[in-house]
Amino acid sequence: MPIRITGLNSGLDTEAIISALVSSYNYKTNKYKKAQTKLSWKQDAWKTLNTKIYSLYSSVGNLKLSSAYNLKSTTVSDTCLLYTSPSPRDRQKSRMPSSA
């Protein structure tokens, strides 16, 4: 059976001293755990960002290949009848080419 010497015998309040030391230790460990949690959140955010950037880089890298584009060609037999427009709206604003 352990013998405890309380503050009455030694003149010191040992319980208060021990609880203060333990609370200081607990504060430090909680502070480090919070910092570690924040660090893991930041690492997860960076991993997600890196994954998205890599997928964008891969997609853009595929665009430099000619197979990524739908290549089409046309031929016109009578150049006087040729008229092109990117959209119907532009066709209304522009004038048809006049034949001279």
Image (cartoon, helix red, strand yellow):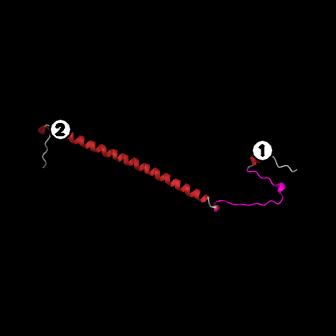
Answer with the quarter of the image where residue 76 lies: bottom right
Q: Residue 13 carries which label?
A: 2
- Number of residues whose C-alpha sits closer than 10 Å to that of mark 1, classed few (under 14), some (14–19) or many (20 or more): few
Whole-percent x and y of residue 35? 37, 46
* Residue at figure coordinates x 56%, y 58% from the top left: 58
The mark total stands at 2
Q: Nearer the viewer, residue 99 or 32?
A: 99
* Residue at figure coordinates x 83%, y 56% from the top left: 79
Look at the numbered disc 2 and give the secondary structure of its residue: loop
What main secondary structure does the magenta stretch of the protein show?
loop
Whole-percent x and y of residue 1? 12, 49
Is residue 78 located in the magenta-colored stretch of the structure?
yes
Name the side, left or right, on which 66 lies relative to 82: left
- Number of residues whose C-alpha sits closer than 10 Å to that of mark 2, classed few (under 14), some (14–19) or many (20 or more): few
Q: Which amino acid does label 2 sit on?
A: Asp
Above or below: residue 22 compared with residue 79 = above
Q: What residue type is labelled 1?
A: Lys
Residue for badge 1: 93
Is residue 52 located in the magenta-colored stretch of the structure?
no
Cα separation between marks 1 and 2:
94 Å
Whole-percent x and y of residue 11? 13, 37
Residue farthest toward the right in the current orientation of the protein? 100
Look at the numbered disc 1 and give the secondary structure of its residue: helix
* Residue at figure coordinates x 24%, y 40% from the top left: 20
* Residue at figure coordinates x 66%, y 59% from the top left: 69
Q: What stretch is highlighted in magenta?
A: 67-86
Q: Earlier in the sequence, mark 1 or mark 2?
A: 2
